Amino acid sequence: MSGDRILRAHPGIGPRVTAAALVASDYFSARYDLDRINGVFSRPAHRLYGQGYVGRVLVLLGAKGGVATAWMLREMAARRMAPAALLLNTSNPIMAQGAAFADLAFMDRFDIDVTAAIPNGARVTVDPAAGTVTIHAG
């Protein structure tokens, strides 16, 4: 579509998805930042505090936290309380493992700061196999 913008990253994992982006210049931990029952960011110091993440493409600076992330993402996906995708500038093996375990679309290592490139609320298509994120115009 005319006016769409395509971002490139390291090829990722998971299915191709289209959803609205939830963007913040902050780091991400499934364990410490989320209320996994109510589907909102719950850590008061997080820039997305109080906002719902279910079905959204989370666009954040990078991963933080440890091994609990893997099973937490899987548990959230099993209950249909997971984000649609995770887009991070930098990640770690635990976050990638968690995304794979939960069958979430996941990409990192973008050519630019993804948190600055994608407007909050924009409709995006994440294509991990191609290593692209399309920001749809309008």
Image (cartoon, rainbow, N blue to C red):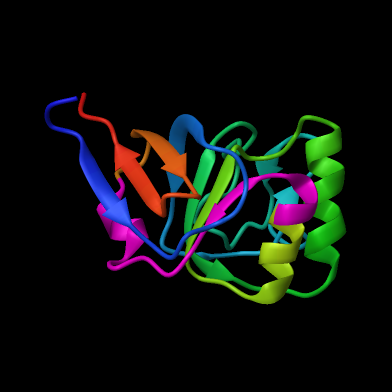
Q: Which of the pair 34/56 is nearer the observer?
A: 56
Q: Is residue 107 magenta?
A: yes
Q: Please indicate, yes or no, whether residue 42 appears anywhere in the rendered image.
A: yes
Is residue 108 left or right of 113 when viewed as pictured?
right
Q: Whole-percent x and y of residue 119?
A: 30, 43
Q: Quadrant of residue 127?
A: top left
Q: Which of the pair 23/50 is nearer the observer?
A: 23
Q: Whole-percent x and y of residue 17?
A: 52, 33
In this picture, which residue range is highlighted in magenta?
100-118
For residue 65, above or below residue 28: below
- Quadrant occupied by the C terminus: top left
Q: Residue at x 53, y 57 (%)?
A: 12
Q: Which of the pair 135/120 is nearer the observer?
A: 135
For residue 1, above or below residue 94: above
Q: Whole-percent x and y of residue 129?
A: 49, 50
For residue 122, above or below residue 118: above
Q: Is residue 101 magenta?
A: yes
> How many numbered marks are there?
0
- Quadrant occupied by the N terminus: top left
Q: Residue at x 49, y 56 (%)?
A: 47
For residue 81, above or below residue 68: above
Find the residue positioned furthest to the left.
2
Q: Please indicate, yes or no, whether residue 37 appears anywhere in the rendered image.
A: no
Is residue 101 left or right of 128 when viewed as pictured?
right
